[in-house]
Amino acid sequence: ESLEQPDPRELAKVMYAIGRTLHDREEYHDALRMYQRTLAIQKQLSPVGGVNISAVTTMCNIARVHHIMGDVDAALRENEAIVELAERLAQGKPHPFWADRLVVLGHIYTEVGRFDKAMEVFELAVNTAGGGDQLLVRSSPLDVDARLAASLAKAGLQHPGAAAA
């Protein structure tokens, strides 16, 4: 008797949900491992050269967990990669998600003392948002899940944490 292999998309959704639950329970090491396993599956599902929205969301949570755990260098590297993907997702046009990720990156540059780079990124964020300087005021540089879901919904995409219709 052979067991049927689970659908990788469904497996990734369940693994992401487990990662979020571990994250919410503040079990950060386990959450990070689950997010990383989820991301590996999501990347396999991505078209060559394409941007997978689910993978970007998982990367955001990986960056957040690294930051919470005090690994600012890893959070910085992850956020730099996220900004590159967000720019590709936005196709170089102003988009709130890209701008939001630039703000997060700018805050982390500030945290590590790279002030000139932070200013450069903040200026790009304002231009990317179409001049919306409200972006520069945030209580937490990594609080983006709700904004991400709203931004994706406007683009006609579903946040991977949302229930399927």
Image (spheres, helix red, strand yellow):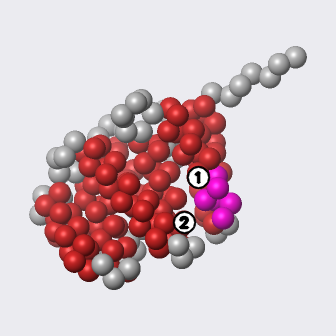
What secondary structure is marked by label 1? helix
The amino acid type found where label 2 is placed reads Val
Circle 1 residues within 10 Å: few <14, some 14–19, many ≥20? many
Question: Mark number for residue 122?
Answer: none
Of residue 129 and residue 35, the one placed in the foreground of this image is 35
Q: Which residue is mark 2?
A: 65
Inspect this view and state whether residue 17 appears. no
Residue 12 picture quarter: top right
- Is residue 118 shown above or below 97? below
Of residue 150 and residue 36, the one placed in the foreground of this image is 36
Image coords of residue 82 (percent x, y): 38, 54
Q: Which residue is mark 1?
A: 35
Image coords of residue 2 (percent x, y): 83, 19
Specify the farthest residue to the bottom.
Answer: 113
Asked whether 97 falls inside the magenta stretch, the response is no
Specify the farthest residue to the top.
Answer: 1
Q: Is residue 35 left or right of residue 134?
A: right
Residue visible at 87% across and 17% down in the picture? 1
Q: Is residue 159 left or right of residue 92?
A: right
Q: Is residue 164 left or right of residue 95?
A: right
What is the chief secondary structure element of the magenta stretch? Answer: helix
Magenta range is 29-34
Residue visible at 75% across and 21% down in the picture? 4
The answer to whether mark 1 and mark 2 are in CB contact below 8 A is: yes
Q: Earlier in the sequence, mark 1 or mark 2?
A: 1
Residue visible at 50% across and 58% down in the picture? 61
What separation in Å lies between label 1 and label 2 (alpha carbons)?
A: 10 Å
Residue 25 picture quarter: bottom right
